[in-house]
Amino acid sequence: MRSTAALRSLQPTARMMFRQSPRMMRPVPKEDQAGHTISQRLRKLKQIPAELIPLAVVVGFAVFAAGYSSARKFFVDKNLRLSRTGAAGRADH
């Protein structure tokens, strides 16, 4: 008797069955990046908060300075070995 009650509780009832979701009749939204012209992209720049512009300037300068100092180190430093030198290096390779 108890087993049949347990089996009945496992069977789906009308309120437990899955229902199909209602069909959406709205059009599919267009992509944000689709077909932007230069003027549209310039208009998007106005949406950037003014507080972030100095931060962008500082970060941009830091990236430029890091690239400049690295490139200068590679070209100016004579102690830095960028390739094999001497007969021993050529013989091994």
Image: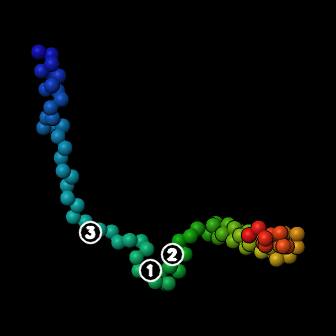
Q: Which amino acid type is shown beneath numbered disc 2?
A: Lys
Which x, y percent locates residue 34? 40, 76
Which x, y percent locates residue 80? 84, 69
At 42% from the left and 71% from the top, the residue drawn is 32
Mark 3 or mark 2: name the one nearer the start of the chain.
Answer: 3
Residue 27 numbered tag: 3
Residue 88 at least partly seen: yes
Which x, y percent locates residue 56? 66, 69
Q: Which of marks 2 and 1 is in front?
A: 1
Say above or below: 6 vs 83. Answer: above
**The C terminus lies in quadrant:** bottom right
Quadrant for residue 70, please give it: bottom right
Mark 2 or mark 1: name the one nearer the start of the chain.
Answer: 1
Mark 3 or mark 1: name the one nearer the start of the chain.
Answer: 3
Label 3 to label 1: alpha-carbon separation: 20 Å
Instruction: Please tell me how crowded label 1 is: few (under 14), some (14-19), or many (20+) other residues with Cα within 10 Å.
Output: few
Mark 2 and mark 1 residues within 8 Å of each other at the beta carbon: yes
Instruction: Please tell me how crowded label 2 is: few (under 14), some (14-19), or many (20+) other residues with Cα within 10 Å.
Output: few
Which x, y percent locates residue 88? 83, 69
At 15% from the left and 35% from the top, the residue drawn is 12
Residue that sits furthest to the front in the current view = 91
Say above or below: 84 vs 23. Answer: below
Question: Which sits in the foreground, 92 or 76?
Answer: 92
Q: Name the residue under label 2.
A: 44
At 55% from the left and 75% from the top, the residue drawn is 45
Q: What element carries label 1?
A: loop
Q: Name the residue under label 1.
A: 36
Residue 54 at least partly seen: no
Q: What element carries label 3?
A: loop
